[in-house]
Image (cartoon, helix red, strand yellow):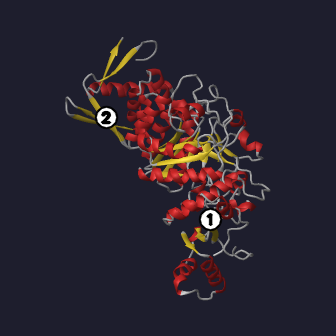
Amino acid sequence: MDDIFLVPVIHKYLLYSPLHHFVALVDRHAAQLIRAGLNTQDSVPEVLKTIAEQLHSVEINPPTVRTGMLDDPLFLGMIPTRNCNLGCRYCDFAAPKLDGPVMSLDTARQTIDAYLNLLKAAGRDYGEVHLFGGEPFFAMEVVQFIVEYATLGASELKLNIHFEAITNGIYNSKSCRWIADYFDTIILSLDGPAEIQERQRPARNGHNPFSTIIRNARVFSEAAVELIIRVCVTSQTVGRMAEIAAWLGEEFRPSTVCFETLTESQLSRASGLMPPSPWEFVRQFVDATRVLDRYGIEIVLSTTNMQNIQTSFCPVGKDALIVSPDGTLHACYLLPEDWSRNNLDLRFGRVAEGRFEIDDQALQRIRSLSVYDKALCSNCLCRYHCAGGCHVNHHLAGAKHYDDLCIQTRLITIAKLLLQMKQDELVDEWLTNRPAMEASVMQPTDRLFRLEPIP
Amino acid sequence: MSGNQSYEVLINPHPLYWVRDREQILIVDEQSQEIYALQHVEAAVWTWLALAYSYAKIVELSTAMLGVPSAEAEQRLQVIFQNWQNTGILAIEAR
């Protein structure tokens, strides 16, 4: 009952309980009656009884931080290489691009042995192998070995393995068809039509890879592999999100388009690229939602996925086993330099002799990184899905006010909940009323049971 | 096939089609109407051949996959290639 939230939306109130999977739109008087009724067990008027009953019903338990042995990893992440053939102007992977280390076949083999044995010992019949980079397919032979070897091992142990990779889409046709045949999910980074993609994601060798990426995106569209397209939105492209959505819907067949805002870095600043304003982003996000809906394509901003009730936004804290090219075990796929800058150490072991050697103290320290330690999140309606966002790039320690990332997540969460209730007109009115949007996202607490009266 | 000799490996000259699922690769020889199922290491080797990897690279990948010395992996490969020649799904042509 504690985690029921109330957010003003112009003259109405959004009542949201993530742990009941419940959302309603009420007026101020109804909100007051519901609050009083739930608080004092007084009866609420007949017309509000259904709502009160829903909120009195058994809620799912708040998510908890993992404890005990590591026997249920979220997935096995493998980083075949940090190298990449693109020179994205906003890339926050400051690793060497062309001559960095590549995972040896022996390390790949031992990693897969360790993962499959862990799954088998835990009595599981399903696992996931996710490939990250750099560009994972820049080490194509290693990837092809990983997939073949894991498929062979899984078949012998009667395990079903899901293969997923995030990629820039630059490889020849033959390799692309192999990827389409052997992978279950491909997350393709594609920022938009040619002029956007070429400006933001140029190749390192001076060639223009756009036509190759488009050809490969079409191969993925026609194959059984699930295609997810990830678009990085900047202040320069935010106004074109609906156009980008329409272009993606016309050209390809993704299941999902993931619009993520630029993470500001030294490189992005040097390139003159900035994140968009959250106020503009939410307007464009709603427009893009409607465009993609016509194509039956889901739209996602990762911090607003309300299906996930969680204490941590990302793989950190969920026992993901992310193996770097040298066999070190990490909880995060970002670079160790990035964690260190933020006083985090997300290493918790290594792969050796075909098993994971896990530093239990480090594992517990990483597991404890959760939304429950983020004071700013404690009264936010997004606490159980955003969970404070990225542990490395979203700085919340000591923060007293919502920053742009918080505002963006809160605005889109509210818009999504309203759209879920088919409140399109209200959403449109709200999006053109900046003071109303500010009133929604800037209130000191979203909790229904706040000390202050409902505004 | 090994050492300093150089060979060109050719997929069967008449049309072959293959599909792959979790467990195996099924090869259909349209001319003879025969179907062949390749599993485990054979399926991996077929894939690497189809991706046009060199013999040396296939030996390296097979060595890692089988977890055996490369000479042993090469022997196993020879047996596989010989079987495929016998069944007519692969022809190996010396340069």
Q: Is residue B38 left or right of residue A259?
A: left
Q: Residue furthest right?
A: A398
Going 77% across and 42% down the picture, which residue do you hit? A341
Going 60% across and 25% down the picture, which residue do you hit? A204
Q: Nearer the viewer, residue A28 or A296?
A: A28
The subunit carrying tag 1 is A
* Closer to the eye: label 1 or 2: 1
Going 42% across and 12% down the picture, which residue do you hit? B5
Going 43% across and 32% down the picture, which residue do you hit? A215
Residue A113 image position (x, y, % from top left): 53, 43
Q: Is residue A300 above or below residue A381?
A: above
Residue A216 image position (x, y, % from top left): 44, 34
Name the element at disc 2: strand
The subunit carrying tag 2 is B
Mark 1 to mark 2: distance in Å?
46 Å
Q: Amino acid at mark 1?
A: Pro
Instruction: Identify the residue position indicated by label 2 in the image.
Output: B18
